[in-house]
Amino acid sequence: MMKIETRYIYEKVWQLTNEQDLLRIIAEEVGDADPQGTLIYIKEVIKNGKEITVGDCKFRKVKGV
């Protein structure tokens, strides 16, 4: 399972985030869009080490995992 870190754009520290919290954050950021589908897209984008911003939150794969 991929480990994902998040941080809001106004924060300086990345936080390891579990899947339940990821879905909550995504729902807050995208409103009526599908949080589960958005999470699948985020995982696809970050799997090769990229970062993605959704609303005010950034997502990245934990390095070295």
Image (spheres, rainbow, N blue to C red):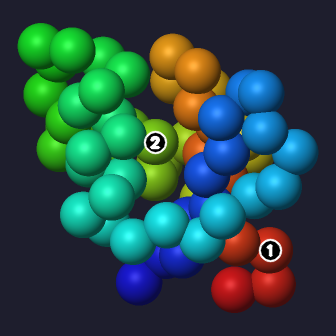
Q: Quadrant of residue 63?
A: bottom right
Q: CA distance from mark 1 to mark 2?
A: 16 Å
Give the x, y percent position of residue 60: 67, 53
Q: Nearer the viewer, residue 20 or 65?
A: 20
User: Quick one: label 1 or label 2, which is nearer the N terminus?
Assistant: 2
Residue at 36 percent of width and 53 percent of height: 22
Question: To which residue does mark 1 refer?
Answer: 63
In-image side of 65 versus 42 (left or right)? right
Q: Secondary structure at mark 2?
A: helix
Question: Above or below — where is 46 with respect to 31?
Answer: below
Give the x, y percent position of residue 16: 60, 71
In-image side of 21 versus 17 (left or right)? left
Q: Is residue 63 visible?
A: yes
Question: To which residue does mark 2 refer?
Answer: 42
Residue at 12 percent of width and 13 percent of height: 32
Residue at 17 percent of width and 44 percent of height: 36
